[in-house]
Image (tube, rainbow, N blue to C red):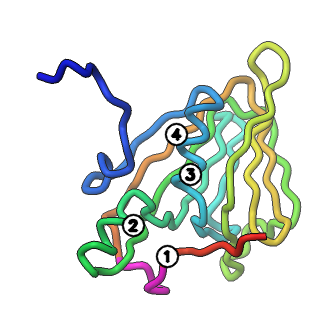
Amino acid sequence: MSDQGPRDASFADGAERPLRLKALDAEDLGVISALVQDAVFNGSDMVFKPRERRFALLLGRFRWEDKDRAEARRRDYERVRTMLVVEDVQAVRSQGVPRGDSETVLSLLSLGWEPGEDGTGTLRLVLAGDGEIEVAVEALEVVLRDVTRPYAAPSGKAPGHEEN
């Protein structure tokens, strides 16, 4: 037993197991946002169920938590199919997102939270190429859950971003 007390989780803690995380505040959402950066999906991979007040996306998530291990072991980078589920949804709006289109690949850059009054707010899913999905919610509740085993990233590369 360590005298240092409990420690925060790190990316390495999830390297070998499927992730299941829940965000109930902006700080939690920042962790999920980092994990879904560069996830890919198409218009047919998202659904809004107004009666259930739920919005869901099936993502091909790059496994950032495994990147260093893959490099150290000189093995393929991995992706995993992941569900991103938003609860207590009041409305969904989008711009530059072809709904139902199974051909166009979209890339998720980040998740952002804009609080409103009394716990309400807007979850913003920012996409590459100026696309955006706005999800108005009664309260922030976002769940990330890996639903398949990891597989070799088809590109064979880790996503990269040019510095401005």
Looking at the rendered structure, the secondary structure element under dot 1 is loop
Report the residue marked by disc 2: 67
Three-letter amino acid code at the position of disc 4? Val
Name which of mark 4 and mark 1 comes first in the sequence. Answer: 4
Helix, strand or loop for the magenta stretch, by majority: loop
Q: What residue would you read off at disc 1?
A: 158
- How far is the residue under mark 4 from the one under mark 1? 24 Å
Disc 3 on helix, strand or loop?
A: helix
Distance in Å between CA atoms under marks 2 and 3: 13 Å
Q: CA distance from mark 2 to mark 1?
A: 8 Å
Could you give the CA–CA distance between mark 4 and mark 3, rounded to whole angstroms? 14 Å
Residue flagged by tag 1: what amino acid is it? Ala
* Mark 2 crowd level (few <14, some 14–19, many ≥20, 10 Å Cα): some
- The residue that appears at 47% across and 57% down in the rendered structure is 82
Within 10 Å of disc 4 (Cα), the crowding (few <14, some 14-19, many 20+) is: some
Amino acid type at image mark 3: Ala
Q: As rendered, which of 81 and 128 lies closer to the eye?
A: 128
- Ranked by sequence position, the earlier of labels 1 and 3 is 3
| Residue 20 screen position, x and y as percent | 40, 42
**Residue identified by numbered label 3:** 34
Q: Residue at 31% across / 72% down in the picture? A: 70
Q: Which mark is residue 112?
A: none
Q: Nearer the viewer, residue 125 or 76?
A: 76
The residue beneath circle 4 is 143
